Image (spheres, rainbow, N blue to C red):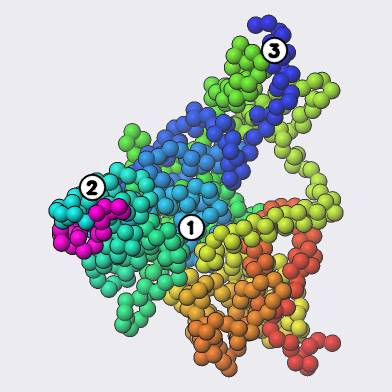
Amino acid sequence: MPNAFEEQACRFLRGEENPFDAFVVPDKPAHEFSDCHVSEVHGSQFEQICRAIDKYRCPDYRTRRQLHESRVLVVRGVRGSGKTHLLHVLRQRDTPAPEIWVCPRHYDPAFPFAEYLLTELVRTLLSAEDIEAPARLRWSARQLACRLLEEAIASLSPLEWLQWSQPPHGRRLVSPRPKRRWADRESLLDDLAISTAPLAEVCQRHGLSATAAWALVLRHVERTELGTGPAVRMRREVLLAFAELALRNTPDRLASLLEQDFAPPGAALPLSRANVVTLLLQTLAETLAAVSVPIIVALDNMERLLAPRGPVDNLAAQAFFNGLAHTVDQTRGLLLVLFVERGLWNEFGSTISSFAEHRLRQGVRIRDYGCVWDLELTPPTPEQIDQVVRRRMAPLLARAPHGDQLPPCFPFAPQEVREIATMGVDVLRTALLRLRDRYDELVLPDSQRVQPPSGPEWGSPPSGSADPEPHQAADALRQTWEDAAANGRRRLAMSRRTSLAQELHTGLGRWLEELIGQQIHGWRLSEVRSAVTFGDHPAFGSVTLATWQNAQGRSQRMALGPILGEGRSMPKDLEVKLSVLDQRPALADHLAVLWPVAQGTTIEAKQLPAATRQIWDTSAAGRPVSLCPLPLSDFAWLLGFPEWLTQHAASAAAAAALFPFVLERTGYLLADLAPAEADASEVPP
């Protein structure tokens, strides 16, 4: 090969990005993610997880017994081994039917684990953040509604079909009308089985209006799902919610699932909170199984979930694994996959009880592999690293001058790639860092080459490196704060508030914990408990408790209850929040109802909607309750606060600046959440 070709290619590559710069996979993969994937790396683990998922894809689901028992897979690997990359590959693979991947951002042990999973599942189904989520949901809704509609139409007699249908557009009413109309029914059934067009459009072509199709599905569900028990009521509601989305293009019924009351009419006692959650979670799993859509709960970045401030939160980890074990016992049809850093997994050892460990080890039985539950990500082989180099260089060489006449690993020599791969490479990230630096050495002019830092892992700061200067830490706090608030605003605009309840309470609790010791109106904030659950309503029955003390040592417990219900759910939300004062033993001495308002506005009882005001007038009068405005902008930064705090938890300089920064930015809100001003005799001099 002439040297001129190599020189031309190097000059071309100098103007392109280094293909080995992408060595850390973000939470959301970039558009070019597929260009970096090499199927040979972790191929065995990928195959086993895929087979486990396929076991949860019921091809012809009819009864609950067909659902596989809920099970757990643990994927372990050292930092940089490719756990997050593997998760993205699994989520993006081509499948005959969509898969619902639930990937929680945070975990708050105050919430029962089943509620945690249910809320995250509903949020995932309705997510507008994931570009592909609406398509997955609409596909599932269409398949389910199509199945219900086929069953409803197939049950009609010729006379009933004539009553329900109308002649297709443009057809004249000529004899023999009944036979031709019956033929429309047969052709509609055939079309429903093969067409991918919107259901309303398919029905209209054959003389069945969208309104009539919806009424048929409604009647069919009411006739086939008989009974008044909570499980039947839930199944009816879930089926109709999916069908309404497919036929009427309205997701409201599905979005309000968490807010509904499924107690049987005339029941002496409401359905317990735990039963509501477990039944609804199970019903959603069964409904999606009916159209061969499996639910996979993927818990990645366990450091963020169970060690958000550096060391492992042992109480949170214990609650997490016990909740995981109970979910395995109480549900069917869920596959839970934990992607865990190996060292962190070892730290979890003391928090995993024998009860939880036995459930974790049950695993999934897979043909050819046996019982799979613990998958270890091993270091890449030299052959696999060679494939990585070829894959990442291929798009560049395809555009380079005479690239087809260059070796597939150019600008590296094959022996050079093997030397890098065998020089103490324990994880793929180490190899990528070395390839990144060597690539620049080969491509860039001598004056532009950067000497790689010394250390066990290139690209990582040495363990003894100093924290940034205080002013740099403050700048980082400001910049990341704006990013977190913007992300919170986006999520708030795209999601129903009840699906964000857990994260909002977590943010409220973490924020107040940062301000413990602060004094307002003669009261000092002394203790905070986020997301305290009460009552039987899983969507609205939670508050954050803040305990305040005055100079004489008297305590007052403030329950902070943000109103999350919207529209018709708002009165119910207020009613449930007010009931926190009726709990025995008493949870709080005072309730602050946090009402969502626009920035710069206030709220008074007379401004509440009529039905909500009626609840306020009858239940709040004469009780220790206050109505506090909570601007939507505050909702937004509270949503982003836990992640923002985690970003800076490990930096000593940032930690020193946290309290004054948070107080400066958010202190205005604290005054509304403290007890009323103390008597003059109680205020310290």
Cα–Cα span, label 2 and label 3: 64 Å
Residue occupying image coordinates x 55% and y 63%:
500
Q: Indicate the amino acid at tag 2.
A: Ser
Judged from the image, the secondary structure of the residue bearing numbered disc 3 is: helix
- Residue annotated with mark 1: 126
| Picture coordinates of residue 31, whole percent (x, y) | 58, 38
Q: Is residue 543 left or right of residue 57?
A: right
The mark lying in front, picked from 1 and 2, is 2
What is the x, y in percent for residue 193? 27, 46
Q: Which residue type does callout 1 highlight? A: Leu
Q: Are marks 2 and 3 in contact (CB under 8 Å)?
A: no
Can residue 66 be seen in the rendering of this structure? Answer: no
Q: In the rendered structure, find residue 580 and report the number of the disc placed on it.
A: none
The residue that mark 2 highlights is 187
Circle 2 or circle 3, nearest the eye: 2
Q: Which quadrant of the structure image shows residue 236?
A: bottom left
The residue indicated by pointer 3 is: 6
Determine if the magenta segment contains residue 161.
Answer: yes
Q: CA distance from mark 1 to mark 2?
A: 33 Å
Point 63% across, 60% down: residue: 488
